[in-house]
Image (spheres, grey):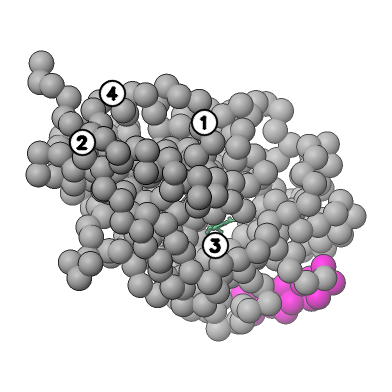
Amino acid sequence: MTASPRVELGLVPYRLALTRPWASARGGFPARCGWLVIAESQGLRGYGDCAPLPAAGTESPEMAERRLGALAAGALDLDETLAALARAPRSPTPAADFALECALCDLASRLADTSLRRRLTASARDRVPVNAALGPLSETHPGDLARAARAGFRVVKLKVGMTTPQLELQRLRDLAATLPPGLRLRLDANGAWDPAAARQVISALADLPVESLEEPLQEPDWPTLAALQSIAPFSLALDESVAAHADTLDPARLPVRRIILKPAAIGGLHRTLSIARRLQTAGIEVVITSLVESAAGLWPTAQLAAAIGSPIPQGLATADWLRDDLGAPPRIQDGYLHLPDSAGSGFALSDER
Ligand SMILES: O=C(O)CCC(=O)c1ccccc1C(=O)O
Ligand SMILES: [Mg+2]
């Protein structure tokens, strides 16, 4: 038996400007800040990305930095550390744990000369359907929808809950009138509404080409969500309100048809994979999304989505929000993110850094 590789961890802080500020009902950000995590052994490197975003269910940057600093203080045993991550319950630092697991899994799959997705599951897909992430409804124009349709997207995601329901419904009706055929709207209210407003919006959306609606309620109590799902002709989804306890969800009792899983908020690739499998087996729709982090985080997240194989569009078309990046992002064409057969996650650090 060969000994498990010893791994040195390195941390490189980064700040990536966006092409325009990200905005949502739960706030936004003008840039993405985080740490590139580099795991090195036997002349090979694996990469992870820790980009905390507390509004999405991760720890604070301060907590992440402390955890990463402690991890990088000494050499790690590759197999032992991966096994410990798989065993442990979700820690108070899910984004740091995710980054560590990504770096180690990337390295382990490069050492084994296999892609990260096939290391996760033999039956992984080579492409993943994705939605366009267009930003706030109020900043979206018919030309943006036409461009998304021309690029091959079938679902475009818009942020709502940022002005009054009345104004937003009028704008949605106007946009829907210009919507290219075959394109549907995925809406994300990020917890904007009280039950009455949510009911009003959902009833009015029944006539529009809406694919789904994420996090309608300020206070996401399950009986109210179940009542809303029963009047909605599309899937309602929970995202940040379940991130901290996604592994304890009982799929049979969920009030909605869909769960959004952000691996950096869930606390890792394997943890997200097992939650996704349990939900899918029970008929719950699963969507894996990025945190609008660097390509070092987007690549392993896309590999995970390919291993999960959910047939509906995933939230991974976020690279265009970044003005610059740590490396090239995965290729998106005809509404699919395409993954190469190369070893590891597919991420390569740009040489100018
Ligand atoms: O789902 C997508 O297409 C992009 C990901 C996304 O919307 C998102 C990104 C960062 C933080 C929160 C969210 C969200 O879904 O609420
Ligand atoms: Mg969401």
- Assess whether mark 4 and mark 3 are in contact (beta carbons under 8 angstroms): no
| Mark 3 lies on residue | 155
Cα–Cα gap, marks 4 and 1: 17 Å
Q: Residues within 10 Å of mark 4 (few under 14, many from 20)?
A: few
Q: Residue furthest right?
A: 196
Residue 45 in percent (x, y) is at 18, 46
On screen, residue 60 versus residue 192, left or right, reads left
| Mark 1 lies on residue | 90
Residue 113, located in which quarter of the rendered image? top left
Residue 115, located in which quarter of the rendered image? top left
Q: Is residue 89 above or below residue 119?
A: above
| Mark 4 lies on residue | 80
> Which of disc 3 and disc 1 is earlier in sequence?
1
Cα–Cα gap, marks 1 and 2: 23 Å
Q: Which quarter of the image is occupied by the N terminus?
A: top left
| Mark 2 lies on residue | 7
Q: Residues within 10 Å of mark 3 (few under 14, many from 20)?
A: many
On screen, residue 41 versus residue 223, left or right, reads left
- Say whether mark 3 is within 8 Å of ligand 1: no
Q: Is residue 88 above or below residue 44?
A: above
> Which amino acid lies under the numbered mark 3 shown in the image of this protein?
Val
Examine the residues drawn in magenta and state their main secondary structure: helix
The stretch in magenta equals: 165-179
Q: Residue at 25% across / 31% down in the picture?
A: 76
Q: Which quarter of the image is occupied by the C terminus?
A: bottom left
Viewer-closest of 280 and 219: 219
